[in-house]
Structures are given as structure tokens and as C-alpha cells.
Amino acid sequence: MEDLTTCEEQPPSPLPDAWTNQHADSDAQRKNDEPKAVGGFVLVHAGAGYHSESKAKEYKHACKRACQRAVERLRAGALAVEAVAAALVELEDSPFTNAGMGSNLNLSGEIECDASIMDGKSLHYGSVGALRSIKNPVLVANRLLSEAQKGKLSAGRIPPCFLVGRGAHDWAVAHGIPSCPADKMATKFSLSAYKRNKRKMEIAEKLDTVENPVKKRRRRQSSETENGSGGLDTIGAIVVDQEGNVAAAVSSGGLAMKHPGRVGQAAHYGCGCWAQNACNTNSYSTAVSTSGCGEHLIRTMLARECSAAMQSEDAHQALLDAMQNKFISSPFLAGEDRVLGGVIVLRCCRCEEDQPSEDIQACLVEFLWSHSTESMCVGYMSAQDGKAKGGPCWGNAECVSSSFMGLPGGRDPPPPLTIPLTIPLTLPLTIPLTIPLTIPSPSPSPSPHHPLTIPLTLPPSGPSSSSCCCCCMRFGRTAPEGGWRGTVVVLLVEERMMRPSTHISRLPPGAVPGHSLAIEGGVCRLTSASEEGP
């Protein structure tokens, strides 16, 4: 019992506390300076897989807490890499996520975790794989990153950026990260799932010995469909701070009943997460975090592929193309029946041409998520300061709707249909705003696989220093008149009421996981002032 108490009462994140101590003087000085505007944005996910309606509240609550934790760090002046680590700690501590304590058990009945983190400013990276007996693996990855930034070790040795197994555990303990007894890492949920999976495996192995190859193959395919993608729930987060720096992180307990020592995409460079500030060759700062079947994500290096795609002019279409061509239809996965995965991405840039004055700096953050699994749980929040003058009002914003595409047999979908919408808003506005929509089909034979892009323009209603909005498109049924029918859900967040928003994205009815895609997202305009107005 003492071991359990020791394990559970450890500080959730020693790194943010250390950051606070090291920069206490600068924080105090910053609080006395004018103005007190602090910007930043966080987008988190609780995994791409299957999220049951019965646990939807718990998944959303975990994402909400993770957003709040990251925003607390941003408002304290922390950089993106510290904020993203804080978000991951909160998600790892949830008993409903497959990361840290309570993760999936492997074949031996043990928990081995993977995690990685990347700083877009320095481009440093830290990662751990098959790590046992550490409550928060992301803290070890973060510490590897921060130690590498200090330079070479004694005798000119290169500091490690990726450690696995026993070596990773011993390194973590030597650097002040407490160990948690292995028998305390499992929860009642993970133990119960392990027992169920073990019984299924025993039954399957018995049947394998008596069935002919054809029946065996059919049964395995049926079992795969029945089980769905419920275990593919790696967690992750991406953050942009007030200085425009980006960071990304990911953490996972891996597949249920995996072989001991297996390392998933959460620990692999360019596969689990990616973050890169804008530079001479890149116009946008980008951050990506992935989830899904680790082997699929490793073989396609999906995180880095999506980051590169975000340099295109149309972020929504670029992500759609990357997920379709670099993932679902990737030649590296040509032999797979279903390709399962999901990503969250953001890109940001300074709005040089849209500055109201020299004293106000604006940053445009485009955020998107996409998945080929049945569902994906996400949450997002702005850290924009709530001290702006002028009262409640809304500014200009453009939003991108969700899209759904994917045709069986690798057939090409019809060309995209782009429909501009201008929606007049009357304040006060009821949030969320749901708008029924019927779209005539441009093709003679309407198909639920037709990709849709809907730029949504919100007209101005007065001066505002910042605004955030998200547009989600729901569709999938063919209207009687031969078109599309669904709803556009517009979510707006006024800067004085910045609360975390959570959402479980699902494929439309009838869509086949592993062969179809869902994409949703929005745009957030962050503004900070160099001095307060009169």
C-alpha cells in the first residue's frame, strides 16, 4: 500500500516546476510589464480507434484537462515544448487512455510504453521505447531532449536522444524521474482487458490447430472486423506558443497483447510526432502528432509526411492528399487489408498584412485532424489573454469543414466540390450554431465518397483583438433530389470565454474503417498587443 501511495502521489510533472524555479525572476518581471497579453494554442487527441458512447464523457474530460494544463503553462510564459509535455502528462494520468499508467498489457502481462517529443525551435528530439515502471514516459523523453540541448557529454560523447528498455528506465531514475512499481502500473481496466484478450487468444489458437487455411483466414478477418480498432488509442498533443514556436509529443502503451520489446510509432523519429518552426525553406511552422497502428505509421513516416504537406497553400486539401496518397494508398502498405491511423496537425504564420497597428501582432493558426479509424477524440483551446477592450464581439475568421473520402478497391474519387458559404451572424450568438445544408451533386451519380471542402466566412461585427472558430461538416447521406444532405456546425470562441472544446470525430454511417477518411478542423487568430490602449 505504501508503494501505491508513493507512486500515485509523485508530482505529475517535475519539469514544468523546474522551469518555474529557474525563471521565477523573469516571470515576476513579465507580470509587472505591460501588456499582459499571452497567446498560444493547443490541440490534443486521446487516440484514433474506437471510442464508445458510454465512455465519451471520460475521453472528452481527459482532453479538456490536458488542454487546460497546457494553457496554464503557456499563460505562465512557458515555451511550446514545456506546454506540450504538460498536456501529455495529463493524458497519461487518465485511466481511460492507453499511455503511462493503465496502458495495454503485452503478452507477458507487463506494461511497456513508448513516447517522444520534438521542439520545433531547436529541432531537438527525445524518445523512449519499451519503457517499464515509469508513470509518465513523456517526462523521460522531454528530459532526453533538454539534456541534449546542453551539448556534448564528458570526453566529447554525443548525448542520447532515443533510449529503450532497461537502459531508458535506469537513465530516467538517474535524472530524478521516480520509478513506479511494475505491479502498480496496471489499472482494473487494463487488467480486465488483458484477461479478455488472453481468453480470446487461447480460443483462437485452439481453432488454428483444427481449421483448414481458408476457414482460418476468414475467421481472422471476421475477428479483426469485430474487434475494430479499439486498441489503437495513442495520445498526443501539439502546441504553438506566444512566440510562434511549435512543439509536438506522443505517448502510447502500444497494441494490446504485443510481443515484449515491441516499439511502436510513438517512439520512432518522424513517425509519432513532428515539429518544425518556419525557416527560409518553410513558410509555415508545423506540428503533427499521430495515432493508430504503429506498424502502418512507421512504414509510412506519416508525421513527417503530413508536416511537409502543410507547406502547401491549401492546408485542408494538402492533408487530405497526404492521408490518401501517403497513407491509405501508400505502396509501402499495399498488402494491408485496412490501413488504420489518425493525425492532428497545425500550422501557423504571422499575419504581416493584417496587422491593425504596429503595436498589435497577429498569428494565424490552422488546425486539422484526420483519421481512417472509426473515431478520434480531440480537444483544443486558445491561451489568448482575456483582457482585451471593446466588449464581446466577433472578428473575421475562415473555417474549413470536415471532408470524407475513400473508395473501395483504390478507385479515384470524384473531383472535390468547393462551396463558399457566407453566414450572417447576429449577436448575441448561440453556440454551437447548427446550420442544415443540402448541396446539389455536380455528378450524375452522387456518391458518399465525394470529398467536400467548404470555406466558411464569418462577417465582421466589430473590432476584436482575437477570435477563434471551428467548423465541422456532418454528411454521408444522399439527398432525395440527388445531392448531399447534412449540417454545418459552427463553433465560435470569444477571447474572454476561452474554454477547452472537445469533440469525438467519427466516420459517417456506412464508411469502412481503414478505407475511408474523415477530416475536420478550423482556424484560430491569435493577437497580442505590445501596449494597452487607453
Image (cartoon, rainbow, N blue to C red):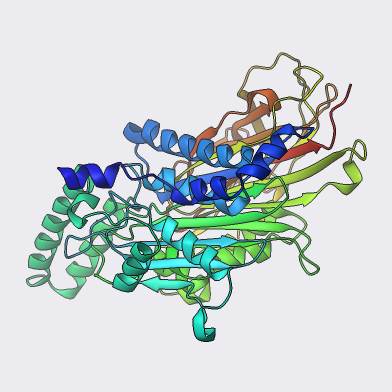
Is 481 displayed left or right of 212 in the figure?
Answer: right
Residue at left 64%, top 62%?
Answer: 307
Q: At which x and y percent is residue 484?
A: 61, 38
Can the viewer see residue 183?
yes
Q: At which x and y percent is residue 419?
A: 75, 41
Outermost residue on the bottom side: it is 155
Along the viewing direction, whichever of 89 and 50 lies nearer the viewer: 89
Outermost residue on the top side: it is 428
Does residue 159 lie above or below 126 as drawn? below
Does residue 312 lie above or below 392 as drawn? below
Along the viewing direction, whichever of 12 and 97 lies nearer the viewer: 12
Residue at left 55%, top 51%?
Answer: 82
Does residue 194 lie above or below 281 as drawn? above
Quarter of the rendering occupied by the N terminus: top left
Can the viewer see residue 477?
no
Along the viewing direction, whichever of 350 and 224 lies nearer the viewer: 350
Asked where in the image residue 110 lies, by quadrant, the reply is: bottom left
Residue at left 71%, top 39%?
Answer: 29
Q: How many marks?
A: 0
Residue at left 35%, top 46%?
Answer: 97
Quarter of the rendering occupied by the C terminus: top right
Q: At which x and y percent is residue 128?
A: 40, 67
Q: At which x and y percent is residue 215?
A: 18, 67
Is 148 displayed left or right of 495 in the figure?
Answer: left
